[in-house]
């Protein structure tokens, strides 16, 4: 009897342990949701009030170039101007600028100093023919990651947006689709929080549906106005991954303003003709082209 009693106790303890360790069931949101036109209206009402942005904060990046990994971190300044101007400059103590991402209406570029000592650059709409020298982080995609662009209200104009609601994530999911010669392809996916209509996830795809950039956006804050309740909101933390290269980057902004003085301005987004690196790689150049070396400093 003692043995049977002990066995029964062990069974009860085992069942109790199984129950306590079982994963909690996620609760789905089943309340009312807005139609697509209303969601877009609210997103645009916020984003249209972010024509420019000046911000600073902290960053960490793991740069992977041809299998070699480099870690950089430090302070970061971010400048943005609709529709296509972006500059993110990262500094490290007395070393000065060690990392830069930039884009303007014609060109985009990535500069990584220290051990990498390289600048990659290309032109919007270029062929990116130099596959062997593709950028480990693609600046032309960073504009999408900020999540501050407005959405075209002509829902039949390619790229065509399609919306569905994710009840477990409590978010509206937009997928943009564009025509290819033989099919339609997904180009971008953005998740907007149901309650705030602010972006919380951005995923960009290549023509074969592979993820080229994945980003989680969080800690949204007013973009510096006297009346914070009336100011547009922007994410201040960005966690990015670039699966093709294996690179990743995180930056968190602790100061956010529409402008600081007259910055950003036209000079803020000029292509850096003297980047101060040893290698300069044109990703649109034909494959056999060797990287040119910058003039001696």
Image (cartoon, grey):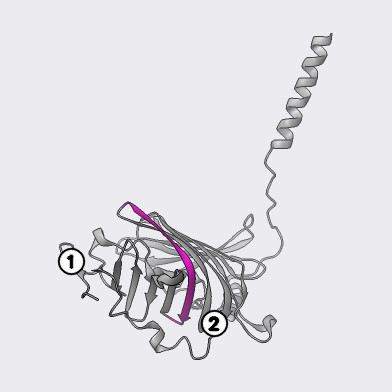
Task: Confirm whether the magenta stretch covers residue 169.
Answer: no
Image marks 1 and 2: residues in contact by CB distance under 8 Å? no
Q: Residue furthest front?
A: 94
Q: Which mark is residue 286?
A: 1
Q: Between disc 1 and disc 2, whose residue precedes?
A: 2
Residue at 33% in and 61% down: 115
Locate the N terminus by quadrant: top right
x and y percentages locating residue 72 in the rendered image: 43, 62
Vertical position of residue 230 compared to residue 245: above or below: below
Within 10 Å of disc 1 (Cα), the crowding (few <14, some 14-19, many 20+) is few
Q: What kind of element bears circle 2?
A: loop
| Residue at the image point whose x is 51% and y is 71% from the top | 147
Q: Is residue 155 left or right of residue 170?
A: left
Where's residue 159, x and y in %? 42, 71
Farthest bottom residue in view? 262
Q: Which residues are magenta?
A: 67-83
- On whether residue 71 falls in the magenta region, the answer is yes
Total numbered labels = 2
Residue depicted at x 61% and y 80%: 232
Compared to residue 2, the image places residue 237 above or below, namely below
Describe the element under mark 1 as helix, strand or loop: loop
Q: Is there any visible trace of residue 229 in the rendered image?
A: yes
**Residue 61 - label:** none
In this view, the residue farthest toward the top is 1
Decide if residue 159 is in sight here: no
The quadrant of the image that shows the C terminus is bottom left
Q: Nearer the viewer, residue 165 or 206?
A: 206
Q: Main secondary structure of the magenta part?
A: strand
User: Label for residue 50?
Assistant: 2
């Amino acid at each position: 009897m003692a043995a049977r009693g002990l066995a029964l106790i062990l069974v009860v303890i085992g069942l109790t342990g199984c129950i306590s360790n079982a994963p909690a069931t996620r609760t789905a949101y089943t309340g009312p949701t807005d139609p697509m036109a209303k969601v877009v209206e609210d997103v645009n009402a916020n984003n249209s009030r972010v024509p420019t942005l000046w911000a600073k904060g902290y960053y960490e990046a793991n740069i992977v170039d041809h299998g070699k990994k480099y870690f950089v971190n430090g302070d970061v300044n971010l400048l943005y101007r609709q529709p296509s101007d972006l500059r993110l400059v990262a500094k490290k103590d007395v070393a000065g600028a060690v990392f830069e991402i930039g884009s303007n209406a014609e060109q985009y570029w990535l500069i990584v100093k220290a051990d990498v000592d390289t600048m990659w650059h290309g032109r919007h709409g270029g062929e990116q023919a130099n596959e062997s020298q593709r950028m480990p982080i693609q600046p032309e995609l960073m504009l999408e990651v900020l999540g501050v662009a407005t959405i075209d209200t002509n829902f039949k104009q390619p790229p065509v947006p399609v919306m569905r609601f994710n009840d477990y994530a409590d978010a509206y999911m937009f997928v943009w689709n564009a025509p290819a010669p033989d099919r339609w392809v997904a180009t971008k996916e953005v998740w907007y929080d149901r309650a705030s209509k602010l972006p919380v996830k951005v995923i960009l795809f290549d023509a074969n549906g592979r993820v080229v950039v994945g980003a989680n956006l969080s800690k949204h804050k007013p973009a510096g106005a006297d009346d914070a309740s009336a100011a547009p909101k922007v994410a201040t933390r960005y966690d990015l991954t670039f699966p093709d290269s294996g690179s990743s980057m995180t930056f968190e902004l602790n100061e956010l303003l529409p402008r600081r003085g007259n910055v950003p301005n036209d000079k803020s987004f000029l292509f850096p003709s003297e980047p101060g690196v040893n290698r300069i790689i044109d990703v649109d150049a034909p494959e056999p082209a060797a990287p040119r070396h910058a003039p001696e400093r």
